[in-house]
Image: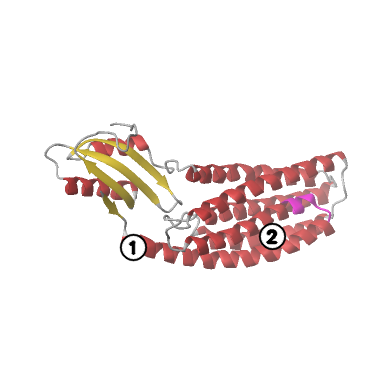
């Protein structure tokens, strides 16, 4: 049995984590400061749209804090208790953040229904000024997080929420202008609901992806059947079973497989070829390949045979 792990990967992850932490810290400072201002503005100007945007901003702050914690814990070395390390904490944190956002959306929808039944006076100019400040803050935060969004579920989650909040700020500004020139205060809860409907599909995608990781599903973009066929087509391979592909985070994909050798095949060469194919074609740096001369089930278990 052989084990292959790219030595540069951990070094690269350290640099990525450090850069992400710096960007997250700046974004957190900006977002937390504006959150306080938006909550105050929401109550002072009696705007549900502002409070809805502030609720989403609260999840932004939570996402940024959790993401920073995930980077700190994720950097801890593996130990005898957690042999894969702590990187999956990032996945748990992202899933929690998605659930929190669903709860906030439900609150906003309920409050909007109340305001449809009992319209309330809204100070549109104040609402628009606060939203304009929020638009600038969200844009800066989004730019800070953009470069790290594809390397981390939590950075991606924070980026999506900040991006959605930026669109929300635009919606609040347009709503404030509409209220100012028409006097229709029911526009305010409509904008609030619109913000919620805008962000929920993206939240569902994040929850779906993190759940797949927690269930040790095949990572997005990979097909188990395709990988099985490619391994089977390599020289020296007579068959394979026990093929598993999963990830502990969206950065680290792992694979284990039992390869049955042809009668004249060299075990080391075949194993090296399998690991090279997994690494070069599918970016699977962490692979464990066991070679054997027969396809007999291991440990009394029944296996899937090629």
Q: Residues within 10 Å of mark 1 (few under 14, many from 20)?
A: few
Region of the chain picked out in magenta, as a range = 45-52
Residue 70, compared with residue 212, is above or below; it is below
| Residue 277 relative to residue 151: left or right | left
Q: Quadrant of the C terminus?
A: top left
**Residue 292 x/y as whole percent:** 21, 40
Is residue 62 among what the camera can see?
yes
Q: Residue at x 27, y 48 (%)?
A: 275
Q: Residue at x 75, y 63 (%)?
A: 37
Q: Of helix, strand and loop, which one carries label 2?
A: helix
Residue 12, compared with residue 180, is above or below; it is below
User: Residue furthest toward the front?
Assistant: 300
Q: Which residue is mark 2?
A: 134
Q: Which residue is mark 1?
A: 8
User: Residue furthest toward the left?
Assistant: 264
Q: Which mark is residue 297?
A: none
Number of numbered discs overlaid on the protein picture: 2
**Residue 283 x/y as whole percent:** 34, 50
Asked whether 251 or 73 is in front, the reply is: 73
Q: How is the image coloured?
A: secondary structure
Q: Quadrant of residue 296?
A: top left
Question: Magenta stretch mostly in which secondary structure?
Answer: helix
Q: Residue at x 52, y 65 (%)?
A: 21
| Residue 251 relative to residue 206: left or right | left
CA separation in Å, label 2 and label 1: 40 Å
Magenta residue check for 237: no
**Residue 301 x/y as whole percent:** 34, 34
């Amino acid at each position: 049995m052989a084990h292959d792990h790219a030595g540069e990967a951990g070094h690269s992850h350290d640099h990525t984590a450090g850069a992400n932490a710096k960007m997250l810290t700046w974004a957190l400072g900006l977002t937390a400061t504006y959150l306080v201002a938006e909550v105050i503005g929401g109550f002072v100007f009696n705007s549900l749209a502002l409070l809805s945007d502030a609720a989403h901003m609260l999840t932004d702050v939570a996402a940024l804090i959790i993401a920073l914690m995930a980077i700190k814990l994720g950097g801890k070395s593996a130990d005898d208790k957690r042999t894969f390390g702590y990187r999956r904490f990032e996945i748990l944190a992202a899933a929690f953040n998605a659930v929190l956002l669903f709860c906030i959306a439900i609150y906003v929808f309920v409050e909007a229904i109340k305001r449809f039944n009992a319209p309330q006076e809204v100070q549109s100019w104040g609402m628009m000024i606060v939203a304009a400040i929020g638009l600038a803050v969200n844009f800066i935060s989004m730019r800070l997080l953009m470069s790290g969004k594809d390397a981390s579920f939590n950075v991606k989650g924070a980026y999506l929420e900040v991006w959605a909040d930026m669109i929300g700020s635009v919606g609040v500004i347009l709503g404030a202008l509409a209220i100012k020139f028409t006097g229709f205060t029911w526009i305010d809860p409509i904008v609030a609901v619109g913000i919620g409907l805008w962000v929920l599909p993206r939240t569902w995608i994040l929850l779906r992806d993190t759940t797949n990781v927690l269930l040790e599903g095949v990572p997005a973009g990979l097909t188990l059947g395709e990988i099985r066929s490619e391994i089977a087509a390599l020289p020296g391979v007579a068959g394979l079973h026990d093929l598993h592909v999963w990830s502990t985070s969206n950065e680290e994909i792992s694979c284990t497989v039992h390869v049955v050798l042809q009668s004249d095949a060299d075990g080391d060469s075949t194993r090296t070829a399998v690991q090279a194919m997994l690494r070069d074609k599918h970016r699977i740096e962490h692979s464990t390949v066991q070679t054997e001369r027969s396809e007999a089930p291991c440990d009394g278990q029944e296996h899937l045979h090629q």
